[in-house]
Every structure is written in structure tokens, then in C-alpha cells.
Amino acid sequence: MSWRNELLAVWAVTLRNALMGARNVFFFFELLFWPVVGVLSIGLMSRFLELTPAQASFVLVGTIALSVINVCQLEVAYAVLLDVWSKSLKHQFLAPIGIRHLTLGSWVVGMVRSSVVFLLLAALGWWAFDFEVLRPGWLALATFLLGCFLTAWVVGVAVCALITLFGNRAEAFAWATVNLVLVLAGIYYPVSVLPEWIAAIARAIPLTYFLDAYRSYYGFPSEFAAPVATGLALSVLYGALAHWAFLAAIQRARRTGLLLKMSE
Amino acid sequence: MLAIDARDVEKTFRSGWFGRRETPALRGVSLTVERGSIVGVLGPNGAGKTTLLSILATLLTPDRGRVLVLGHDVVREAGVLRRRLNMASGRPSFLWSLRVGEIIAFYGRLYGLSGARLRRRVDTLIELCELGSYRRVPYSDLSTGLKQRVALAKSLVNDPELLFLDEPTLGLDPDVSVRVREHIARLRREQGITIVLTTHYMREADELCDEIAFIKAGRILSRGTPGELKRQIRLGEVIALRLDPPAVTWLAEAPGVLRCVEADGWVECTVDEAEKRLPELLRALHNDGVVIRNVQVREPELEEVFVELAK
């Protein structure tokens, strides 16, 4: 496939997801309602508990990361979910495209949407709770967002693989998986407070390192050496594994007939 | 030159824990299709028609057998092959919020079309499938017939050399069915597309197909042109008579008459050989004082062949 066709296939999926998102009222809730409710409730709780500004920033970073990753990973999962819901999956896999086009196209939309969520929540956090999202500087912020996007990409592709492997029954994974990842990655707390065996799992999650690196600018010393590099390396490794799993799941679905069962 | 060359294809679906429940769908199916022809795959429900089409279209992988489509192996060279074929189904489904034009354009992009070329292609297909007034209508707001036309338009977006149509007129009004059949015939006539279709409508198969493969319980039972199939089954020919008086009791016992039925004022006698039996019957009726008001001779309908083969 030429580069032009590669980009065109990615663009086709991007445009499709963007159009679907723009025309669905529930997507609006995903984009605005729940993220805003999350930041407001956590921010107010931090005020009630009389946390220091640094501690409040610590938990707000986690809350914002949760919303950013949630929105972005759902969009990646829509690469398959939209077709499963509309029972049009077979048309997609009849076309000469690869899973990279589906996941990348959806990821692009996910990054745009979750960037909007991030800007909104950052503004809300600054206005309501004096949370300074830019205190770590542009580069640190960009790295943190990249880490969130990469985590969302890995989780989203893994969800696509599970749905293709188990069918509609696995849809709940799309909603639940990311929350488990976030809990393990130390969303509201440093991973050092976790029991050792859970902390070991946390150390295998890329987001743990991106949260750690970003929070270090708010006065919480980093628990890891070279957290950004470790997070990036783990993201690439898991991204490749998730894509391999997705590909294997599609091949299995072609073998078992699940691809047809999930269509028409 | 062959568009499809499938040999001894087998497919079994497994379900339940550890795949213990097995449902054989295809049991050694062989099928060849000449380029530029329309071939119908007919058979009762659960015969394996859709499974066969799905394997040929690379949506399913066969358990055994060798399948070459347009010269490519459907398993090893599926990626190359997918550029050259397409498929439409009688139970189409697309993303509910996308509009007709957007659906066709989305699939067009997946096949490498962009810019002015994509716009021209979408326009052409919308015109061809008479969807002009519905271009901006969301898919969920379309009627069944319109959805099927969208599916047909989508299936032509890559100018396929080979088109699979799975019950293309299922549930359509008769007038819409006629138009869809006309589209299909025109595609072959004007663009030389090879078409493989499954259908439950015998008239559709009789009208469109150069050849028909009859499939039952995962095996192809019979194959040939509609005429050949009718002869193969030896259903005989039908002599339809309008008589006065309308009922003649001895007709069913006459030499060469296999059976006789009365319907709508006609007596339909299925005979072994119409050319030989017609003069004999007319003579006997005349001698019996029966007035013959009308006579028609016809081959049996394909539906009768279907019923016979499906037994």
C-alpha cells in the first residue's frame, strides 16, 4: 500500500468517527458532562479535606488524566464498537485496510476530543481550584498528554481485540478496563502506598511513569529513574502487543465466523 | 478464463465450550465460475450458500480445500484480492448516523479514492442506484429498499471485477426488485463484472443467471444452466389445457402423462415428452367430444426443480 493510500485509509476512519461523534448526543456527555462532574467533585473534596495546593494539584492531575484517557480510549474502541453496534463489521474487513488504519484513525479523533476535554478541565481547575496546569512547562505538559494518549491507545486497541475475540459480550471491557488501569497506575495516590504485589503491577503500566513525571513538578519527588523514557518504552511495547492481539483476534473471527455473526 | 476456482472446500463451525458442538457448513464444495458470467448459488436455508460466498469474499477462512479467486489464494493473498472484489447483502447495515453520500465516500476512501475522483465516483453511484434525493439522508432514516440500494452502491465503489450479492432483493417490493435485477444485468452487460449471487427467488435466478449451482447440506447437488437443470431433474414438460367441459377424468391415466392438476380453469398435465404426447392427447380429447379452447406447452419452473432437489 502506498503512503497516499495509507494516509487516506486513516483519514477515512478519522472522518467517519468524527462525523459519528458530532451527531450523537451521548458523545456530548462523554466529552463534557462526566469530566466536568469529576473535576468539580474531586476539587471540592480536596477543599473539604483541606489539602495543600500541592496535594490538591496531585489529585486533580489524576482526575484530569482519567477523563483524558477515558475519552481517548473509548474513541479508539469505537474503531470496532461502532461497526459492532451497527452490524456493519464485515464491510470494514472486506475492504483492503489493516487494523493500523482503524486504530490510528480512531486515535486521531480520540486525541482531538480528549485535548478539548483537557483544555476545558484545565481551565475549570484553574478557575475553581487554582490548579496551574502549565506550572511544569509546555514540554512537560506535552509529554504528560502524550503519555495519556499512548495509554489510551494501548487500552483502546486491547478492548478492540477483546470485542473481536468474544463478540458483543465483551463490550463491558470498553467501559471498565480503563478504570482498572487508572486505579493501578496511582490515579489519586503515589504507587508507593499500594501493597507490594499491586505496586509491581503498577510498575508495569506506562501511565504510572507519566503521572509520576508530571507530578514531580508539583513538589512530589519522582519514585522512578527516567520515568518518561520507561513510560514511552512500555507504551510502544504494549502498543505492539495490543495490535498483535487485535490482528490475531480478527484472524480467529474469520476462522470461527464471529466476524459474520457480528454483521448483518 | 476462471474468476473462481474452488476445490473441495470444507468448513465446520464450532460452538460451545472448547468448540465441542460442530456444525458442518460445507462438505467438499467445488465450484468454478467463468469471468464475466452470472452464477447463482441456490439452496434451502442452512444449505451453506452464505458460508460459501463469505469464503470466496475472504470474510471466512476455509478449513480445507483450495480457493483461487481472480487468480489469488483467498487466505494467503486476501489483501490483494480485496481490492478487486466487493459484496452486497440483502440485509445491509451501515453506520446509522452517516448520510448516504458519506457512506459511499467512506468506503471509497478505504479503496484509495480521493478528491475529484472520489466525488465523481460517489455522484455516479448515487445516480446509478437512483439515490439522488436521499444523498443527505441518514442511513437510519432510509426504507429497506433504499438501504439495499445503498449497499449496492457501496459494493460498486471500487469498480470490482467480481461482485458477490447475497440475496440482493430480499424483502423488496416487486417493482424495486425488478429495478435491482435490471441493475445487476446491466453491470454484467456494460462492465463485464463477474457476479455470484445467492437467492431464494427462482424467477430471479432464472432471469439473471447463466449458470446455477444447487447446494444442499453443504454439498453442490447439481449444476448447469437453468434449462440444463430442468432437463437433468427430468421433471418433464407441462401441457396446459383449457377445456370444455373443464374436467376430464381419464386424462391422468393417458399414456405418457405423469400427473395432472387443475388450477384456475386450466388442466396442467406433466408429460414425459410434450412433442410426442401433445398430438395424441389432442386427438383423444377431440374423439371424446371435448372442446379445446386453449393449449400451452411450457418447461417446468425453476421453482419446481428447487423443490425436487431440496427433497
Image: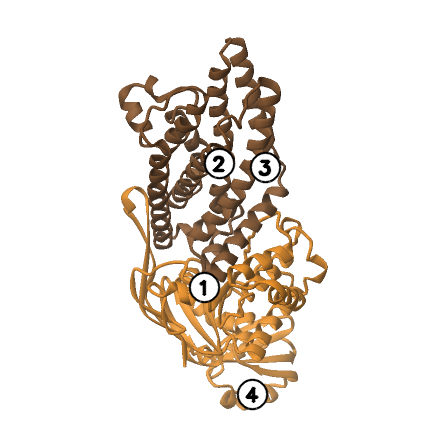
Tell me the mark number nearer the camera, choosing from 3 and 2: 2
Chain shaded orange: B
Q: Residues within 10 Å of mark 4 (few under 14, many from 20)?
A: some
Please say if B111 is above or below A87.
Answer: below
Cα distance between the residues tagged 3 and 1:
34 Å
Cα distance between the residues tagged 4 and 2:
99 Å
Q: Picture coordinates of residue B308 (x, y %)? A: 44, 69
Mark closer to the chain start, 3 or 2: 3
Cα distance between the residues tagged 1 and 2:
31 Å
Q: Secondary structure at mark 3?
A: helix
Amino acid type, mark 2? Ala
Amino acid type, mark 3? Phe
Count of marks overlaid on the render: 4
Disc 3: which residue: A27
Q: Secondary structure at mark 1?
A: loop
Q: Picture coordinates of residue A193 (x, y %)? A: 34, 17
Tell me the mark number nearer the camera, choosing from 1 and 2: 2
Disc 1: which residue: A2
- Colour representing chain A: brown
Tell me the mark number nearer the camera, choosing from 3 and 1: 1
Cα distance between the residues tagged 3 and 4:
80 Å
